Amino acid sequence: MKLLLGDEAVALGAVHAGISGVYAYPGTPSTEITEYIQAHAPEVRSRWCTNEKTAMEAALGMSYAGKRALVCMKHVGMNVAADAFVNSAITGVNGGLVVLAADDPSMHSSQNEQDSRFYGKFAMIPILEPSSQQEAYDMMPYAYALSEELKLPVLMRVVTRLAHSRAEIAVREPLKQKALSPDNERTHWVLLPGNARRQYATLVEKQTQLLASSEESAYNKSEIINQKSKLGVIACGIAYNYVMENEPERLGVSVLKVSHYPLPEEAIKAFAAQCDALLIAEDGQPMVEEQVKALLGADYVLKGRLTGDLPRMGELTPDCVGAALGVAMEQPYANAQHVMPRPPALCQGCGHRDVYDALNKVAAEYPDARIFGDIGCYTLGALPPFRAIDSCVDMGASITMAKGAADAGVYPAIAVIGDSTFTHSGMTGLLDAVNDGSNITVVISDNLTTAMTGGQDSAGTNKFEAICLGLGVEPEHVRVVVPLPKNMEEITRIIREEIAYKGVSVIIPRRECMQTLKRKLRNKK
């Protein structure tokens, strides 16, 4: 037995399923999967990728070579990987390929709470959604066998509560890695329109097989309490736990657990026939609720997020599920004094603080200045005491939004982006700005690591000047500074000079993250 996080259970399950490589870009709540493999399975190829698209493509390449691969990302990373992900359903796979998407209902550390199951449905591939850490571990060899049987990638979806909570896991004997056996069938992999049309027709034909595997899956099971229940529950993934915590058997409530998609339609129809009404419990958007409504018709009574019986947004909880089941909830702390929230803040001594101090000082001299932010720990510059950035939309958007604002006449338009985010998706925006001669100032705040997710390697470390020069930024307008209070006069002077330049300029404030520096010093001791 092992005590593991849900993420670690996924990782160990993948290692024991015989993977040869894991490809990922760090993003909460998925990061610990790759970190666990890096720490415990040196035989598995496991270096961080520049972004989720490159990770997806590398994993597909390993699958092409006949070996099993895992690719991991948080839910918004699916947007970045979508081109390769959707097309991988058209090429099909050779070695088993599992795509792990870690969703973040309630947006604990994300810009949105999108539901990755829609991506699996869109790509028309199997989806697995474990309800527990043990199931997350057990599903991995099943997922790889299913992938190789169907010759399709498999999407596995977990959520924050499962990813970041611990449970005891019973482990099994690991499988050996697959032998090298590259695919010799070129037409599967060369997606010229003629080939792609044939491959897409094959994918459509496989949907009957996908549905049959879901109907027969051990991960979809019904627990009938009465031959005719007033209420039944379709419980998806982790929501099954929340239902079971409310003792449905005591309530006379039947349960159909769904953890393998596409939805088992015949099982749902048979289950619905034994219930007067159904509650759909799913941690995410009402994907299943909408499909079941279409399957059973408008006259069948359904309850869920769309009807208001469960909250329309955020995570489910045992309490809100219990309330939907008619369980009276005790609220012993309803009148208690709430603890005042403590918003997150940049670490004391962080170089980003000095960057924002300098930017605020200079921006105050320009009545129409706008500072466009990006995704990373430096996004906290939007909060007090700095209140320094005017936007934060997605990774890489700072540079291209600054470009668009400058095109519209905003002056000065300043972009702030981190080192890891710059290589993830900022480089192409900088190239656009160079090609268009945009009047923007780009600040690449380089703390020599991917700090927001725990200090993983940053793909561009020690390469940023060369990258900017290679993209066409004029050498005299690529400036490097050390963000320290004693250098404030120099930093503000350089910012003013580069704002005055009518073109693309890049300022790179470089100082190591305080947290990674502390870890290095501890390791030295």
Image (cartoon, helix red, strand yellow):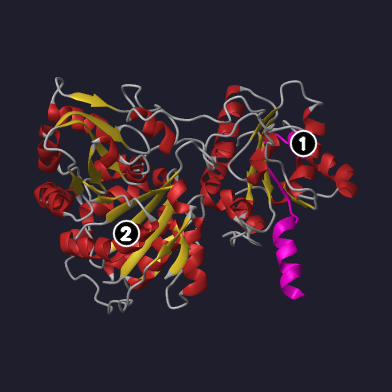
Packing grade of label 2 (10 A; few <14, some 14-19, many >=20) is: many
Residue lying farthest to the front in this orientation: 250
Q: Give the secondary structure at mark 1.
A: helix
Q: Tell me the quarter of the picture where residue 223 sits.
A: top left
Residue 120 in sight:
yes
Q: Which residue is mark 2?
A: 98
Q: Residue at x 69, y 48 (%)?
A: 445
Q: Residue at x 23, y 41 (%)?
A: 255
Relative height, residue 286 to residue 98 (above, below): above
Relative height, residue 155 to residue 501 (above, below): below
19 left or right, relative to 265: right
Q: What amino acid is labelled 2 in the image? A: Val
Q: Residue at x 26, y 68 (%)?
A: 95
Q: How far is the residue under mark 1 from the one under mark 2? A: 44 Å
Coordinates of residue 175 in the picture (x, y in percent): 30, 76
91 left or right, relative to 171: left
Q: What amino acid is labelled 1 in the image? A: Leu
- Where does the magenta region start and end? 497-525
Coordinates of residue 271 in the picture (x, y in percent): 14, 38
Q: Tell me the quarter of the picture where residue 363 sits.
A: top right
Q: Which residue is mark 1?
A: 359
Residue 465 within the segment the image draws in magenta: no
Q: Nearer the viewer, residue 34 or 23?
A: 34
Relative height, residue 341 to residue 240 (above, below): above
Residue 514 within the segment the image draws in magenta: yes
Q: Nearer the viewer, residue 449 or 506?
A: 449
Tags 1 and 2 touching, CB below 8 Å: no
Packing grade of label 1 (10 A; few <14, some 14-19, many >=20) is: many
Q: Give the secondary structure at mark 2.
A: strand
In the rendered view of the protein, which quadrant contains the N terminus?
bottom left
In the rendered view of the protein, which quadrant contains the C terminus?
bottom right
